[in-house]
Image (cartoon, grey):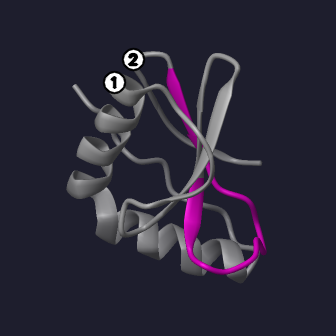
Amino acid sequence: MPELSRFFGIVIYMNWRDHPPAHFHAVYGEHEALITLDGKVYSGALPARALSLVREWLALHRDELAQDWELAMARKPLNLIDPLE
């Protein structure tokens, strides 16, 4: 599963040819959540602070994530996305 970004102990991944809806995986310690591109938790859970940071990052990089989703569906290399600072 390709890593797209890493910040504040949170790692963001996206699978090639993953299932709809368009989403990414956010991992924080032993917690993992699948988050749709509109910011909803599709599956799993993160602590509130980590989820807030992920949503803040998502708001800044939604277009880049959508492009990576299209690349992933085509099994093409994904682009790294800047971390939250």
Q: Is residue 20 visible?
A: yes
Amino acid beneath label 2: Phe
Image vertical order of residue 11 relative to residue 40, above or below = above
Secondary-structure class at tag 1: helix
Q: Which secondary structure dominates the residues rendered in magenta?
A: loop
Q: Give the magenta part as a residue range.
A: 10-24
Residue, x 52% and y 32% (percent of image)? Answer: 46
Q: Which residue is mark 2?
A: 8
What is the tally of numbered marks visible in this picture?
A: 2
Estimate the spatial distance between the alpha carbons at disc 1 and disc 2, rounded to whole Å. 11 Å
State the residue in front, 46 or 54: 46
Q: Which residue is mark 1?
A: 49
Residue 66 in the image: x percent, y percent? 43, 74
Sequence-wise first label, 1 or 2: 2
Residue, x 63% and y 16% (percent of image)? Answer: 29
State the residue in front, 58 or 71: 58
Residue 53 in the image: x percent, y percent? 31, 33
